[in-house]
Amino acid sequence: MTKKAFIFDLDGVIVDTAKFHYLAWKKLADELGIPFTQHDNEQLKGVSRVRSLELILNLGGVTLDEVEKLNHLKEKNEDYLSYISEMTHADVLPNVPKVLNFLKAHQVPIALGSASKNAKQILEKVGLLGVFDAIVDGNEVSKAKPDPEVFLLAARKIDANPEDCVVFEDAIAGIQAANQAKMLSIGIGESEILHEAKYVFRDFTKISTKFLAELLK
Ligand code: B16
Ligand code: MG
């Protein structure tokens, strides 16, 4: 039997921080007079902070110099962190602890593969920092999803072949990154949006232990 390993995205998979990113970006967009909807926010999922700002500026046809961009990025992150500071274990998405416990009980290596530079802080807040065998976040990668760098580095850290890795992702860019890494991609969200994934589940309550056990074979 090959040794399987599992890699989890953070935002939108383990916790629902997309709503906090949206509120913080929306405040900035309003300040800049740029219309920004929840629908627009879909394009920012899994995308780096800097790239997210570029996408919002493009939406409004607004150009800023580098200093202004850095100031806005700092302000957005401070707003975002004020929401994060209120998070507790209750913010972990339903059934995620059950899935993590199942994998732990079967001695399956698990890693985090997130674009967020705040990943460790979020995991700490929700009490999951010690659960992962390896953490790869936005501080360690130079190429953003859909580049497979984040997942390939995570696989290397847990000593797994990419072909033996299963990735849980909520973003289109993340599914593409997992597919490019030749990993088995599982979308968490809507199948119309995540149609490039091998499997898609609405959330972790729809994933049975029987299904997980099949993946371990
Ligand atoms: P930060 P993930 C991503 O996290 C988010 O989905 C994306 O919306 C965000 O812009 C990115 O992290 C960077 O986050 O500003 O905290 O560094 O989904 O890859 O876990
Ligand atoms: Mg995500």
Image (spheres, helix red, strand yellow):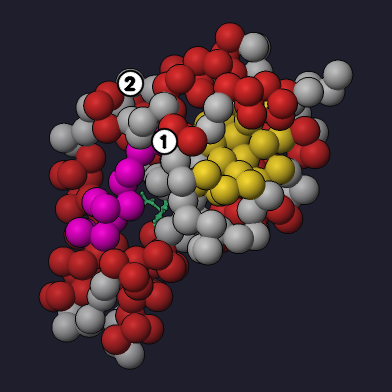
Say if residue 143 shows up in the picture.
no
How packed mark 1 is, by other alpha carbons closer than 10 Å (few <14, some 14-19, many 20 or more), is many
Can residue 122 be seen in the rendering of this structure?
yes
Q: Is residue 64 above or below residue 119?
A: below
Q: Amino acid at mark 1?
A: Ile
Q: Quadrant of residue 119?
A: top left
Q: Is residue 1 magenta?
A: no
Residue at 17%, 53% in the rendered image: 79
Q: How many marks?
A: 2
Q: 13 or 131: nearer the eye? A: 13
In reply to whether residue 23 is colored magenta, the answer given is yes
Of the numbered discs 1 and 2, the one sitting upstream in the chain is 1
Residues in magenta? Answer: 14-24
Q: Position of residue 9 (x, y in %)?
A: 50, 41
Q: Name the residue rendered at 13%, 75% in the picture.
A: 31
Residue 111 at x, y percent in the picture: 58, 30
User: At 71% across and 43% down in the image, what residue appears?
Assistant: 184
Q: Which residue is mark 2?
A: 127
Residue with the mark numbered 1: 14
Image quarter hosting the C terminus: top right
Task: Name the residue rendered at 16%, 44% in the picture.
Answer: 82
The amino acid type found where label 2 is placed reads Gly
Q: Nearer the viewer, residue 123 or 204?
A: 204
- Residue 3 position within the rendered picture, expressed as x and y whole percent measured from the top left: 78, 21
